[in-house]
Image (spheres, coloured by chain):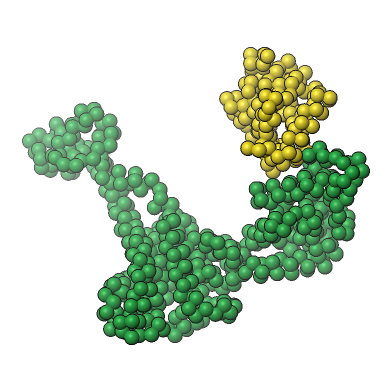
Amino acid sequence: MESDEDFMSVGSSNDDFLDTQDSDDDSLEDFGDDFDGGFSKDKDIIATSRKPYEVEFKVLSPGDIEREQNIQVTEVSSILGLPPESSAILLRYGRWNREKLIESYMDHPEQTLDAAGLGNHFETAPVTQKVPGFMCEICCEDGPDLETYAMRCGHRFCVDCYRHYLGQKIREEGEAARIECPGESCHLIVDSKSLELLVTSDLRDRYHALLMRTYVDDKENLRWCPAPNCEYAIDCPVKQRDLRRIVPTVQCFCKHFFCFGCTLNDHQPAPCLLVKMWLQKCEDDSETANWISANTKECPRCHSTIEKNGGCNHMTCRKCKHEFCWMCMGLWSEHGTSWYNCNRYEEKSGSEARTEQARSRASLERYLHYYNRYANHEQSAKLDKDLYLKTEKKMTSLQSQSGLSWIEVQFLETASQALQQCRQTLKWTYAFAYYLARNNLTEIFEDNQKDLEMAVESLSEMFEKPVPELSKLKVDILDKTAYCTKRRVILLSDTAENLKNGEWTFNVDW
Amino acid sequence: MAIPHSTTQRLLRELKDYTNNPNSALLHLGPTNDDDLLHWEAVLKGVPGTPYEGGLWQLRITLPPNYPLSPPKITFVTRISHPNISFTTGEICLTLLTTEHWSPVYTLSTTLSAIQHLLTDPRPDSPLNVDVAALLRDGDIAGWESIVRYWTSEERWVS
């Protein structure tokens, strides 16, 4: 699936290019709460209200995340009457489950503080000191000028060692929320005030980044955007247990479409669990085994695997020299004179081998049917992507050849985007269909799938036309683009509603 | 790789401390070569009154350049039969030696004492030597003791 990832990210970088054109940084803010999951581009075609397959979500910037954290810390701090840095440690210890934490603190304040690595008394601002006659236990340095530091546990070390220790933890081990005092079996957590005092500014930034990471990791309603170098997080109320009924595709500010449930690329309409099974199946060697059983037979005597790649039905096993008929798997000696034309089909000796083979061949064929189409759309999306890279050039040449303005050739970009998105959806409809049991609902699904597929293929065809013809096709392409998008919305809405209502019947347990 | 001054100083200090206050758990502790402070060796003694009584084991100690911020790597060179020590590689399973649980305040001497303590306090639930751990877990103390005694005298380190 890595290749898929590539293509998606190439997509987003291209989007960036186009975005710089109407560069309007505030537009990101405008998306805000009513951000509709990436369909804003088609506003003129489709109404902007939320569709059955769309979920409510919010994109958070690093600043937003920090603000949210601080609000919670301040709240807890005022409820419990503890300093903010201690409340922060408590919250991190309690995985940001505020209610549970407050309850636990109210019931057993001492125990909760101890468990979180906090002592039960709090001092004012931490300071470094020079202590006469002190020798640092870590570096064995001593001297009257040595700056030292100790938290309230009293384990005192020189500032250099403390700094190195924190650096090691933050930079090398990626620790932040649970760095303990360097002292032997001391579990006191190094609080952010002590940290601010001791470390250099670059480490401080890394520390805050790590703290933020633990915040997002701990909260069930938050997830990082998985796109490379993207620092936004998504806030979405969909819970893990909802994933059987909802496919929560979200879109980050960086334009990356992904599934909030499993952070893979958008895989609507297939639910996460089926996607996981499907990917596993495609990767799995069991399919190789399946091919072997469909295309080979075993010697009835020694069970060596034999592939027949030509010749007659009279087989002589190379290994055990057993002679048998390839058609019926029965003994060759029983064939009498009917060589080369096995008419012993009803004979019992070979019937078991035949049913087993037929079953596994049918299962393989079914899998390959879906897999080929799935892989085809993946491949085509890549080819469309290549075309899309040429679109930019096309648009430029269209502008000069036909005298169209930049804004007038935008239809190509829109078409290309729609094509990408529809192929992504189509691809996953095949994985989804593989797990569907045959019934009326499945037939309707397949009709929708067929409609979308036909629309996509014809748009894809138009898209390949030489540049001079493109301007003449503008209206057609616009129409087809709108049609594709509409078909996609219909398919996704239909599937999502049935999923929500538990209407689908699957041929697997998941 | 250049060793930071603080690491050298700390190791020299540990060496001096050990010479002044030898550890009763050890027969020997010091750098393998005088000119390389990052490779040490030690000889550990068995605890009297346990099946390990009378045993001597050589251990290899490799120190990371950022010691004592990261834990030393310690392995048994002499083979030993113990649930938490690999019989073939000499690797030791001890939480103290992992990055999460290591404290820069531990010294080589205290760490080796902890290893000696591990001999008398085996943890059969996280075994590196499954065969001997199984004996302990099944409660076959007599069997366990005789195997330990056998290997302790059979493999005893001689200078």
Residue farthest toward the left in the current orientation of the protein: A337
Q: Quadrant of residue B57?
A: top right
> Where residue A285 sits in the image (x, y, percent)?
38, 45
Residue drawn at (56%, 73%) of the image: A56
Q: Is residue B143 or residue A205 the one in the foreground?
A: A205
- Locate the N terminus of chain A by quadrant: bottom left
| Residue A34 as seen in the image, left or right of residue A307 | right
Most foreground residue, A348 or A132: A132
Colour used to depict chain A in the structure image: green
> Which residue is drawn at the image coordinates 12% and 43% (left, top)?
A343
Q: Is residue A53 visible?
A: no
Q: Nearer the viewer, residue A149 or A1?
A: A149
Q: Can you give x and y, in whole percent of width and height, for residue A79 in the image?
A: 82, 67
Q: Provide the letter of the chain coloured yellow.
A: B
Q: Is residue A459 above or below residue A1?
A: below
Residue at 44%, 67% in the rendered image: A11
Above or below — where is A308 with respect to A367?
above
Q: Is residue A105 visible?
A: yes
Location of residue A4 (image quadrant): bottom left
Q: Give the image location of residue A280, x and y in percent.
A: 43, 52
- The structure residue drawn at horizontal position 73% and vertical position 46%, both measured from the top left corner, is A165
Q: Position of residue A375 (x, y in %)?
A: 35, 59
Above or below A418: residue A76: above
